Image (spheres, rainbow, N blue to C red):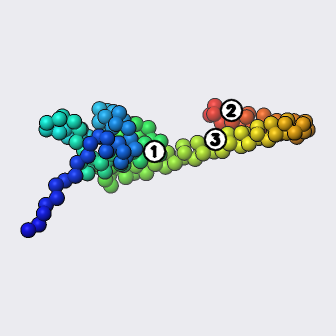
Amino acid sequence: MTASTAPRSYTIREVSALTGLPASTLRYYETIGLIEPVGRGASSGHRVYDETDLDRLTGVACLAAIGLSIDDMRAYVANSRLGREGAGEQIDMLIDHAERLAREAENLELRRAYVALKTDYWRAVSAGDEARAEEVGAQAHTLADQIRSRENH
């Protein structure tokens, strides 16, 4: 005699813990159609997630974690359903997103360098080294101009 295993189901709290997405976000994604409607418990009416729902939400959580917009996540999910026919759009979207992330990383590095310069400036001020403070202050000013220039483009 073989024992049959009932399909595993999950509460919204469990899915939230497993995906890292708050329950409010799970409900929102369902409301806006990013994910398909989730089944409901017969007696309670509460959402009951199955393994397929969990797999889809784990994928969506990854898309959110890399910073895709809701519109891009919708397009990604829709293109995923197309398989090979949607692959070109997936590739283009992911390349564009990788380029945005690279620009963000560059901007973050500039801001980090600015903080390091300002720290050096204040160390020089604290030590009474006016020449060093002036030199580092000028470097920080130049870098601040670069940061503002990049943010305006």
N-terminal label among 3 and 2: 3
Asked where in the image residue 103 lies, by quadrant, the reply is: top right
> Which numbered circle lies on residue 148?
2
For the point 26% across and 42% down, the residue is: 11
Q: In this figure, which residue is indicated by the disc labeled 3?
A: 107
Q: What element carries label 1?
A: helix
Classify residue 128 as left or right of residue 25: right
| Residue type indicated by callout 1 | Ala
Classify residue 81 as left or right of residue 131: left
Residue 20 horizontal/vertical position (percent): 40, 44
N-terminal label among 2 and 1: 1
For the point 20% across and 40% down, the residue is: 39
| Residue type indicated by callout 3 | Asn
Residue 110 seen in render: no
Residue 147 horizontal/vertical position (percent): 69, 36
Q: Is mark 2 on a helix, strand or loop?
A: helix
Classify residue 20 as left or right of residue 112: left
> Which numbered circle lies on residue 65?
1
